[in-house]
Image (cartoon, rainbow, N blue to C red):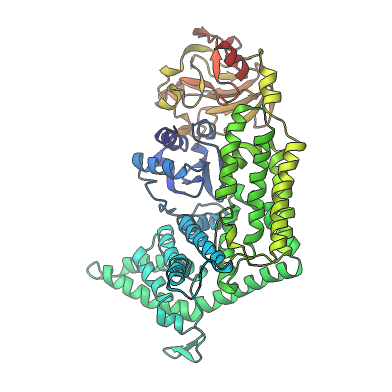
Amino acid sequence: MADYAKTAAGVLKGVGGEENVQSLVHCATRLRFVLKDESRADGAAIKATPGVITTAQAGGQYQVVIGNDVPEVFAEIGKISKFGGSGDTSAATEGPKGNLFNRFISMIAAIFTPLLWALAGTGLLKAFIAAAVTFGWLDNTTSTYLVLNALSDAFINFLPMALALTAARYFKASEFTSFAIAGALVYPTITAAVGLPDLTFFGIPFTMVTYVSSVIPIIIIVWLQSHTEKFLYRVLPAAIRRFVTPMIVVLIAVPLVFVVIGPISAILSGWIGTGIGWVFENAPWAGGAIMGGLWQVFVIFGLHWGLVPLFTLEFQTTGQILLLGPVFAAVLAQSAAVAGVWVRTRNKNLKSLAAPATLSGFLAGITEPAIYGINLPLKRPFAFGIVGGAVGGAIIAIGGVFSTAFVVPSGLALPALFGNGNMILLAIGLLVAIAVPFLLTVLVGFTDPTEDAVVAAEGTDVAVLSPLDGTVVALSETPDAAFADGSLGQGVAIQPRSGAVYAPFDATVVAAFPTGHAIGLRHADGAELLIHIGIDTVKLGGQHFSVKVTSGQQVTAGDLLVEFDGDAIEKAGYDLTTPIIITNPDLYPEIGEAASGPIAHGEPLFFARAVESAIAAK
């Protein structure tokens, strides 16, 4: 059974502790941190934490990929810090200080993430209801349909009110004042005034546009609200500012939306919707191929958040989402690729990972476990998924297939597409998206860890030489619980007596941290080793360390990797005990013949036992 508390503690420690976290939210599969100093994050330690699939840095966020269990890990973080909690509403407090594009992506992610599951869940229900009506299972003139349609349509209808809350948390504005502004935008009499002629506000003419399901106006006005509130709190007397501030803000904000922001955003939204329509009308294959082929690439870099507002804008403008159809092909293609891995691999560990990843992708549209855990590391399955998604997406787009609801593309969400466009081309597109990557993965194959890393290592366990001069101690004596209990990997620790770290075998440097506190190496036979110099030394920010290698560099046993000033580090209050651990226990589950006591660099430290050898030893 997964130990969510241990995962939470390891991740929080790995990102530099609570004091290095500016904000934290989670999406379907990831913890999304905004860190004060990303250089303090120990990526190797985080990846070695049980329950963590991988890490990614994109859109101004430090993302820790967990998979389907992310809500539970998020909740455990809430128990040991002021971040996280039982829900997913801890919004980012402030955008990162990176470039404008990264700040925009981070803002979109922070504002939309807390809404995603409610939006997707109600959208899926709406899709099922629409399918039931299409196939004659439900009469849309009955009171039953009236109730079902209302409860499935209400959230997207009043989306501005939900966005008001998350935007207020992001921009540090008063949440309920934002809610009051959004309420005015979708107030029944205002909605009824859409399209009426000769509307004025104190003599200023304006055109009332619809704010139902809108996105841009409320985000812009909440941003302006946050600045207005700060100004008013500075200038108004303390006795009146708490109730006068929201009165003034609402009085300014709502007319500003009606007269200026709303009409301008409606024009922009119309242009975007028209542009999307033009692409899918004149070159639908191109739009479909881009969305179907590159969607999962966008997901890897966190760029898909920049497209989420386009879905809602298209829906608001046209009542349908053409962009979403090809994304089904992208999701099912990667799911099919990992299914191919499941069928072809002879590695029991890989097969056990591929099985739930396949089901998660096909049924729920959660592809991160498949991508990060299997397809991307194996390379070919990920590429096959892109090919299948591009071809399938092009066919679906040619068929003019669209969704009538915002859903997370998955097998269960397919009813959102039923009856909308050419169903024959939809079926062909989905079949191609599934068949192409599955067959390519099974027939063309990939470098199977069973055939290469494990078999090559059978009977030839990897010898790890000491990278330091010092004294070997048991890993359990490390003054760090995450290392001491072996949760980050099996190995030993060394108490250094000199300030140099040398390569313990011929290897590729997979992680050379600029802070110098840790080095990650990969042996040709597949063993991955982490050398973590001292405890919490990442906090030094590189002070007293000098890194001599770079990521991707090939080194031979005995090459100098890092130099450090041990005396200065200890005077700064840090323990120099250095854990040396194997971080891929799926291939090397045990260590053997470990040295003890005094040791010099280059002397045998321990053997990393490969899977088959470890099984034989038992």
Does residue 395 lie above or below 595 as drawn?
below
**Percent from the top left, x then y, of residue 77?**
39, 41
The C terminus, quarter of image: top right
Closest to the observer: 264 or 442?
442
**Percent from the top left, x then y, of residue 225?**
41, 68
Residue at (35, 45) in percent of width and height: 82
Residue at (71, 52) in percent of width and height: 431
Q: Is residue 114 left or right of residue 44?
A: left
Q: Is residue 408 left or right of residue 182?
A: right
**Percent from the top left, x then y, of residue 384?**
73, 44
Is residue 397 visible in the rendered structure shown here? yes
The N terminus, quarter of image: top left
Q: Residue furthest front?
A: 137
Q: Residue furthest right?
A: 444
Quarter residue 307 falls in: bottom right
Q: Is residue 202 left or right of residue 328?
A: left
Closest to the observer: 363 or 576?
363
